[in-house]
Amino acid sequence: MKAKTSHPLIVGTVILTLTGLVSRIIGFFYRIYLSRLFGEEGMGLYQLLSPVLSLSFSLTAAGYQTAISKLVAEQTAKMKKISLRPMAAGLSISLPLSLLCNAAVYFGADFIAAALLQEPRTASMLRILSFSIPMSAVHACVNGHFYGIKKAGIPAASQLLEQIARVGCVFLVSGQSLSTGRTPSISVAVLGLTLGELCSMLFSLAAIWQSPGAAVSPLHSAHRVRQSLSRQSGVSAGSTLYRGLLSMALPLTANRIVLNLLQSVESVSIPSRLRLYGYDNTTALSVYGVLTGMAMPFIFFPNALTSSVAVLLLPVISENYAVGNHRAVKNATLKTVKYCGLMGIFCMAGFLLLGRWAGTELFHSPLAGYFITTLGFICPFLYLDTTLSSILQGLGKAGHIFVMNVICLLIRLAFVFLAVPRFGIAGYLWGLLASQLTLGILYLTDLWLFLKKTT
């Protein structure tokens, strides 16, 4: 009797979970190394680059990766063979956008650093970072193709390779500098980030080159796709593909840009609000670096588990909702609330008990210990919100999720502008707690109203 084949969704989730955990473990120790090598102020400078990186990815790649994944899955199911056309169409839009973004960040680095990030020292780092943008776009489009054909191993392997290349580059370059008696610059970390993107892009391109249907390089296939589509009933096939791609990608892109703009305003404003509180520039950057570069990654570390659960929940909820099995949706929701809530309470207790030790012993920063202990209170809401968001996505409530996230970001911004100048960084921590609590209540209320209506 033939053995039953494992479900690709479960296999993919296991692969993503394991590689995600390994990547986070590597990243965890990498953060410790960076904090000890570059200090609190250096971490603050490095973290200021996050808004630029997030916005550029949202503009050029994030929405297209998801759209490619959905289109590839649909076309493969209909045609009974793997199609490279959605990926090539996505690349023909995403790559030019990313090159324009690359040029804008490179040549506008001085203006972005001084006027937007309010820190001229980030200009040289922005120029290095700009070259990672087109690499990230290509990598995202190729990953979208592999997610669409349920081959999660390729994106997972590229993610792990990216992390290893990034960390290896920083270790080698900084080690060389230290051996000659020179103190390495924080720009080394940005160089490692860019090299990591290069390695993951090359790995992804090599994988797509070997995949079924890849007769030519994907970077040169977009033109051939347009030609072949134009020969099929005029331009109707081509316009249908691009229309389908854009109809999915543009709303996702718009939502991501709005959310990232709000997050960028928040990130850039924290150091300036701390200066209004009375800190000098060095202290403000140091506090910001400890919070966002040390404490918050530590708090988010267990979220790798809930993120993997979210990956599994989305198709399960979607499938049961589509066939009208509302009892299964309700049971999955109740189990999610129960187990993720318990995990959050357990992690909260761990951070409250061990937070100060972790900050002092791991990061050599008592301030990091204070932040970890304080942020521990958001764990029950933080981990639960990740999976509740996935359930709502499966129920087709993406618009609701967007509105609720905007509300919570506005709450955090209100605390940044009103509470931080008066109470210091404690005002921002209160804002984080208030926003996560609000988001959890909004998610649960939306789900409760849905379940009440369908039962």
Image (tube, rainbow, N blue to C red):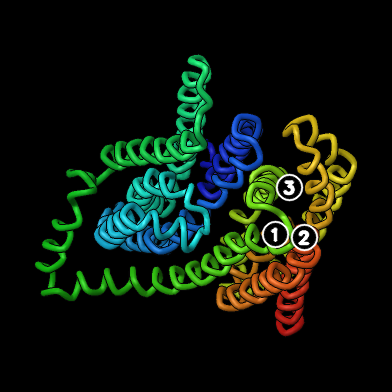
Residue at 48 percent across and 47 percent down: it is 121
Which residue is at 11% across, 62% downward? 227
Task: Name the disc covering residue 228, or none.
Answer: none
Identified by mark 3, the residue type is: Ile
Badge 1 element = helix
Which image quadrant for residue 335?
bottom right
Q: Earlier in the sequence, mark 1 or mark 2?
A: 1
Q: Nearer the viewer, residue 448 or 348?
A: 348
Residue that extends furthest to the bottom in the rendered view of this protein: 453
Q: Amino acid at mark 2?
A: Gly
Side of 267 relative to 415 (left or right):
left
Q: CA distance from mark 3 to mark 1?
A: 22 Å
Residue 274, label in figure: 1
Residue 445 visible, this angle? yes
Looking at the picture, which amino acid does disc 1 mark?
A: Leu
Q: Are marks 1 and 2 in contact (CB under 8 Å)?
A: yes
> From mark 2 to mark 3, how far is it between C-alphas?
21 Å
> How far is the residue under mark 1 from the one under mark 2?
6 Å
Residue at image point 85% right, 39% down: 356
Residue under numbered circle 3: 299
Asked whether 322 or 388 is in front, the reply is 388
Marks 3 and 1, the one that precedes in the sequence: 1
Q: Earlier in the sequence, mark 2 or mark 3?
A: 3
Disc 3 element: helix
| Residue occupied by mark 2 | 424
Q: Which residue is situated farthest in the top direction here?
A: 179
Q: Nearer the viewer, residue 281 or 108?
A: 281
